[in-house]
Amino acid sequence: MSDVDVALLERFEQEILNKMPHLEGGKIVNATPLVDITKDLKECAKSLYKLDLPDSKIYAKFDASLMAGSIKARPAVHIIHDAIKTGKLKSGQKIIEATSGNFGIALGEISKLGLTVISLVSRRLQEGVFEELRGGNVRIMDLDMDICPAPGIKNADADALVVKATLANIRSQLVQLGFDPTIYDDARLRIEPLLAAQDIINLAKLLSEIYDCFCPEQYDNELNIDVHRTITAVEIEQQLQQKGDTLKEYKLVCAFGTGGTSGGLSRYMDDKYGTKSVHVVFPSAGQDVAGIRTKANADGLHLYEPGAYAAEHEVDFEQAKYLLKFLVEKGHDIGESTALALYAILRMINDKDKFIVIVADGIEKYKKNLKEISQSRRIQVSLADAASGIEEYDKIIWVHTQYTPKEEGIEIIARSLGVDKDKIAVPKASTIERLLSTHEIPDELGRELGGTKGKSLLVCMAGNTSLLATKVLASKGIVTESLSGGITSLPEGQGKNPELYIEPARE
C-alpha cells in the first residue's frame, strides 16, 4: 500500500463512491429509479406517429439522476477508484481523457477532490455540453475536429497543412495549461499520424504518457464494461424482483456511446441466462446525436461487440426528436440518446414484449435544441415510414433549385417508395427557387399540390431543400412531408455517383 494515496482513497470512497450505486451485503444501495413509462409512450406513439402499440411493458432506467447527471458517472467512478487503489493516481495529478461530454463532466465532479481534469474534445460538442464541462471544473482542449472521439479514420490522408496547423494549435493550448512544450516537440513524429487520422482517443493516451498523467481510457478500459455487468445489471435485476418480475423476460435497449453499457449488460445476460437480450441503437448515417456514434464510427472501437448483441438498430433522429419533446413535456428527464432508443422500441415492438430502456442522461444540456423542434407535427419522414404510408400521399414531388432527376433517378424514387413513377412530379428548378426566395407558391407547384387528400411527399438530393420547402408550405397551411436524407440516402442511390441519376436543371 506504500504507493497508494491513502488519504485520497478515503476521501474518494466517502465523498464519491458511497453516494453512487454500489453493493452492500449483496444488495445494491443508492439505486437509480426504474420507472414504468408504458402509458406515456403509448400516448406518444398514438399522438405523434399514429401507432397503436400492442400490449407491452416499457421501463426506463433513469441514470440521469446520478452524480453529474449521466450514466457515465458509473464507469468514471469505477475507473478512478481502481486507479487510486492501485496507486496509478494520486492527489495533484492530472487526468487527460478524450470525451464527447458526459464522461468528462463526471470527471469534473471527481476532480473536486484535488485532481486536475483535461478533456480533449471536438468542436461538434453541443453548446450545453461545453457549458457543463467548463462549469464542472474541467479544463478543455478543443482540437477543432469534426468527429466524436474515435480510434482514427481508416486510410486517412489528411492535408499536411491541416496537420501542421493542428499541431501548432495543440502546442499552444498545452503551454496555456502549464505543460512543457519541448516534451511535445520531441514526440512530434508520434503525434502527427494521430492527427492525420483524427485519432483523438490515442492522442489522449499519448499525451498522458509523455507528461506522466493518468488516462482513464474509457474507450478501451474493460472496467467500463465491468461496472455495468456487476452493478447496473444487478441493480435492474433486483428492482424487477421487487416488482415480482425477472430480467430474463426483458429486452434491454441502449444507444451506443463507448460500448460499456451494452457490453456489460450483454455479458450479464449471457452469464446468467445464456441469452442475447441487448438491442443497440445508432442514429442514421450522417446524423449528429450528442455523445452517440453512427454504426460506421463504432466499428474499430475496442468495446464494440456486435456478436454479443441481440440486434443493432439504425434510427432516424429526425423522427425521434419529436418523441423527445413529447416525453420531456410529460415530465420525463430524458436526453437525445434515450429518445433514439425509445423510437427504436416503437419500430420493433410486438405483442407482450417487455423492454427496459437505459436513460443515459437528461434534457438539461439539450434544451436549446429542444426549442427548435416543431410543437405541432412532424415534417420529415424516413423511407420506411413514407413507404409504409404511401397511400396517404397525393403526389411525390421533386424539389430542388439546381438539379433535376434523370429517368433513372425517377425510377429509383418510385421503386424505393413502391409507387408507379407517374405519381412523381418534377416541377422546374426555378419554381422551387421562387417558392424558397419569395415564400409564395408558384402556380406550377400549386397545381401539383392540389390533391384530394391534401398531403404530398417532397424529395430532394439530401433532404435539406425538401425540408425548407415543407416549412414554407406549412406556413401557408399546406401539409407536406420531407423525405429524410433525400435520393442520395435511398438504398439504390447510396454508393453511386449522383451524376448517374441527377443532372443540372435545364430550363
Image: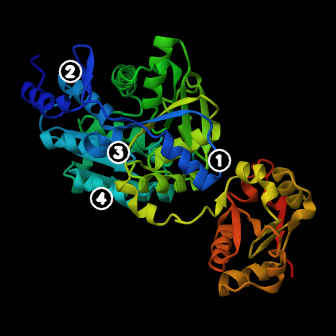
The Cα atoms of the two marked residues, 3 and 4, are separated by 12 Å
Q: First in sequence: mark 1 or mark 4?
A: 1
Camera-nearest label, 1 or 2? 1
Q: First in sequence: mark 3 or mark 1?
A: 1
Camera-nearest label, 1 or 4? 1
Foreground pick, 269 / 205: 269
User: Where is mark 2, residue-wise?
Assistant: 86
Residue 503, placed above or below residue 42: below
Q: Amino acid at mark 2?
A: Thr
User: Where is mark 3, residue-wise?
Assistant: 102
Q: Amino acid at mark 1?
A: Leu
Q: Do the numbered discs 3 and 1 sit on residues whose CB atoms are within 8 Å?
A: no
Foreground pick, 329 / 302: 329
| Quadrant of image for the C terminus | bottom right
Is label 4 in a helix, a strand or a loop? helix
Camera-nearest label, 3 or 1? 1
Left of 16 or right of it: where is 318? Answer: right
Left of 71 or right of it: where is 267? Answer: right
Q: First in sequence: mark 3 or mark 4?
A: 3
